[in-house]
Amino acid sequence: MERITNDWWPKFSQDEYQRRYDTLRKAMAEKGLDCLAIYGAPLFFGTDPGAPNLAYLAAYAPAVHGYVIFPREGEPTLAIYVAGHAANAREITVIADVRAGADLPGIIRDRVRELGCEHGRIGIVGNFAWANTSVPLEHYQSLTASLSGAKFEIVTAWYEELRLAKSAEEIQFMEAGAAICDRAFAAFRQMAAPGVTNVALHNEALRVVHAQGGRISFGHVGSTSMREPNMTYPSFYPTNRVLQRGDALMTELTGGYGGYFGKLYTTSFIGPPTPEYKVMFELAAESYHQLMAAIKPGLCGKDLAPALAGKAAAAGYKPLSFISGWSTVNSRPVLFSRRVEAADWEFELKPGYCLNVAGWVVDQNERMGVWIGDTVTVTDSGVRSFHRSPVDRLADNILAD
């Protein structure tokens, strides 16, 4: 069947998909796995369908949920829940064998038996390791009961680490996603003024992203009075709060292309910032630049702890800066300056990894905060941002002055 283009999953070359399949099969052989059941379901609040682990192999994500059955030997199968979506899935996915029906465990069971893997080792890959989302309990119970001769193992983290280092084609997709995100932020900044609501700003960014064939995984927008602040983190669901002169405005804005996202952590001001916000902006920007300079391939998370801490504490503020892979839909690593979060201190950074890097500073009472950051890739010698937005320059983030 002819594969038809779409705005959700622009296609990679056949060589790229073959590279993924070959890499995965080699790793399966080393781990002793005969077959994988890779789960996918909608993820986050946005217009991108999510299901990153499934879509990586299928170039498609199912409504409700579904699986890729991926054998070490043999052809993969895409199993989707909604039978009425099968024809559309066959138009889009790079997998030739598409099966549909409400009994997803039954489809997996039958395919595993066809492959001769009913007495082998089967790896279960969940939806997304960072969010601790695996497969439905009912599916797991049904599979283990109907394939009682097989040995099952949850291998989500192992699978995701195989796709952390991006190929040259994937880096091109990251570049395209970041450019879309940059243009959306430019429209956002142009619109931000007294009388405009947070929701309107979010919708404008969404409009610009979609007009370019992109999608968002989410788009946080929040605002607060700088004189009576009550925000250290932007709203996941933007509200109809009306901007006023003297407001601080924070975003966590994504824009993606084919599931590869750029992301901007921004703090802007409607009119000149107060002295305290100005100090916090400068500290957050300095922390961001310190992190960008510190990241090198071969370093582990613990090596970056001093740069994560920055100078905020010495200035009387709390440092919350971080390096994270999850919101580029990768998972590992999670590195926070405040160790109350799970931290990958032994995790080694390698060329091709894509990360979010953010300087984040809040006051001692956690009433006000500033963050500055974007999406980067680790290179052979350091780190490179995908973005061109001026998130780290105070003069460019004073709006409606």
Image (spheres, rainbow, N blue to C red):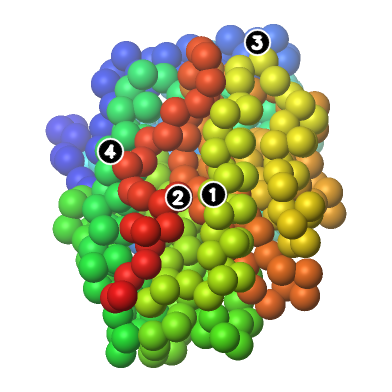
Identity of the residue drawn at 50% across and 26% down? 383
Q: Position of residue 25 (x, y in %)?
A: 56, 14
Residue 221, picture quadrant? bottom left
Q: Mark 3 sits on what residue?
A: 29
Q: Mark 4 sits on what residue?
A: 176
Q: CA distance from mark 3 to mark 2?
A: 46 Å
Q: Amino acid at mark 1?
A: Ala
Contact? badges 4 and 1 (CB < 8 Å):
no
Query: Which element is circle 3 on?
Result: helix
Q: Mark 1 sits on what residue?
A: 285
Residue 93, picture quadrant? top left
How many residues crowd around disc 2 within 10 Å: few (fewer than 14), some, or many (20 or more)?
A: many
Instruction: Using the rendered image of the protein, determine whether residue 107 is visible from the camera's viewpoint.
Output: no
Judge by depth and name the residue closer to the eye, 293 or 255: 293
Front disc: 3 or 2: 2
First in sequence: mark 1 vs mark 2: 1
Q: CA distance from mark 3 to mark 1?
A: 46 Å
Q: Amino acid at mark 3?
A: Ala
244 left or right of 26? Answer: left
Q: Amino acid at mark 2?
A: Asp
